Each structure stands twice: as C-alpha cells, then as structure tokens.
Amino acid sequence: MGGIDFHEENEFHIKSRRLLGAPETPTMVRFLLRIGVAKNEKQALYILLGVIVVALSATIFLMRDGGGSGDEFITGLDGRQYTFEEYVDLVNQGKDPLIPGDFE
C-alpha cells in the first residue's frame, strides 16, 4: 500500500517517498521519536496532527476576530482618545495628535 508497511497487527511504519534510493521515515516523525516526545510512529503522527489542528484553529480564530474587538481608539500624546474617524479628520486639518508639537 504505497508508503505504509504493516509489520505486526498493532504496529505500522510510514515511509516518505524519495526520488532516489529507498524511502525513509519522515523527518518530523524521526525528530519526535529522537527527543522522546513520542514512543512510536503512530504517536508521532497523532502529535503532528494535533499541532496542525491547533495551528489551523488559532489561524481561523485570529482571522475571524481580526486581532481586536473593533472598539479601538487612537490615543494621542496628550492622553486623549480619538476614534479613527476623528483622527483622520484631525490629520486632514493638518493636526496630528501623534506627532509632538504638531497638536496643541
């Protein structure tokens, strides 16, 4: 079956394709086995799948949320908070509350 070898009923070994030579165990699986995080290839694959699920979930959460609540304000050097629209109006008037000495 391609790159999967069944040695015993409870064990399996996945092999990555290689252009030249014999197929070998994927690098990430070997890394997890070498540092002792996983005891066998099956556990290593479950760990890698878990990492993928967590990364995708975090990505979806951050993209949907936009990284903020939508109620952000721009705080000038004087400590006053401006909405984005107020800030743009001030900049269009030539007054930028974020530049020292430009807004008084």
Image (spheres, rainbow, N blue to C red):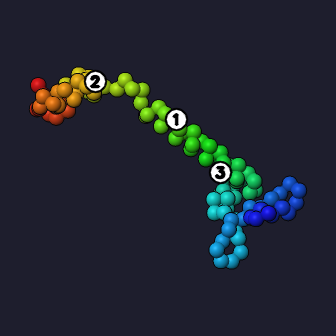
> Measured from the top left, where is residue 70 in percent x and y?
39, 26
Q: Amino acid at mark 1?
A: Phe
The mark nearer the N terminus, 3 or 1, is 3
Q: Residue at x 61, y 47 (%)?
A: 52
Q: Badge 1 local density, few (<14 within 10 Å), some, or many (20+)?
A: few
Say which quadrant the N terminus sits in: bottom right
> Measured from the top left, where is residue 81 in percent x and y?
26, 22
Real-space Cα separation, disc 2 to disc 3, in angstroms: 43 Å
Q: Amino acid at mark 2?
A: Thr
Write down the residue under mark 3: 48
Q: Tell me if I can see residue 82 in this picture.
A: yes
Observer-nearest of 101 and 60: 60
Write down the residue under mark 2: 83
Q: Badge 2 local density, few (<14 within 10 Å), some, or many (20+)?
A: few
Q: Is residue 70 left or right of residue 14?
A: left
Q: Residue at x 71, y 75 (%)?
A: 22
Write down the residue under mark 1: 61
The mark nearer the N terminus, 2 or 1, is 1
Marks 3/1 in contact by CB < 8 Å: the verdict is no
The mark nearer the N terminus, 2 or 3, is 3
Say which quadrant the C terminus sits in: top left
Quadrant assignment, res 11: bottom right
